[in-house]
Amino acid sequence: MIIGTIVLFAIAVAVSFIHFALVLLIIPVAVWLFAFFRDPDRDITPDAKAIVSPADGLVSDITELESCDLVGGGPAMRIGIFLSVFNVHVNRAPCDGVVAAIVYKKGKFINAMSHANASSDNESNTIVLNEPGTKEPVCAVKQIVGLIARRIICELKVGQTVVRGQRIGMIKFGSRTELYIPKRLEPNVLVQVGAKVQGGMQILATVNRPIAIPAPVTTERPAAAPGMPVPSGSIPLD
């Protein structure tokens, strides 16, 4: 974002020496650039059974997979989302989880609308989340570049804990994001192909049990009643 702004400013200064009116041509590009990198806050559902959208865009395909290694090797649901250059490009965590793996793959730059080829052939980065407290994959998010998009940003590390709707990365300039949910969680898909979705806000599916980070257990020693001896190891208060 900073580099792009500096480049546009330099171009504006250069063309101003030719004709000041040419600077006006830079303004729409600058407005689009700032709009592209927008990162609005979102209202995240507290429903622990909800799997929210990992991206803004258009649901391009919903596919049942007989086998998916990303989520344990069993059957899975895949929901593909196409992001145009006008969508917010920040990716978000679909649910609570622990990052089990981050897999980067080099590849081509096929148009992301061609989901059949883009999914398997394009450069991508896949984030696998395990259910908190277990070693079972609960979902996977695949960031895929497109014809224009050439850079994937992932802000996570293996072992990191994330919560539903948390920002996890970005794909710059038009792309595709895929969500994989294992069928053992009995996902009930709530969207259809052609639906417009918003990352972190739109619920794409619900599963058969809550997926949530366990609340921390706090142990507080009860205070001694007046006149009673202070428990061993405690410091008496004045």
Image (cartoon, rainbow, N blue to C red):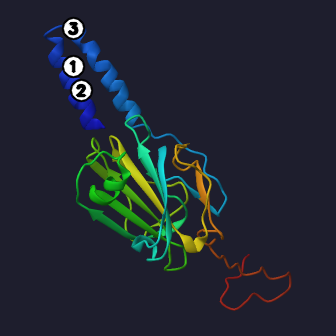
Q: Which residue is mark 3?
A: 20
Where, quadrant-wise, is the N terminus in this rendering? Answer: top left
* x 46%, y 41%: residue: 39
Label 1 element class: helix
Give, as a three-letter code, the residue at label 3: Phe
Is mark 1 in CB contact (under 8 Å) with mark 2? yes
Q: Nearer the viewer, residue 102 or 234?
A: 102
The label number, if any, that marks residue 8 in the structure image: 2
Q: Classify 163 as above or below 145.
A: below
Label 2 element class: helix
Q: How many marks?
A: 3
* x 86%, y 81%: residue: 226
Which numbered disc flags the more N-terminal residue, 3 or 1?
1
Marks 3 and 1, how far apart at CA: 9 Å
Which numbered disc flags the more N-terminal residue, 2 or 3?
2
* Image spot of residue 150 (x, y percent): 25, 46
Classify mark 2: residues with Cα within 10 Å, few (<14), some (14-19) or many (20+).
some
Give, as a three-letter code, the residue at label 1: Ala
Q: Which residue is mark 1?
A: 12
The label number, if any, that marks residue 83 in the structure image: none
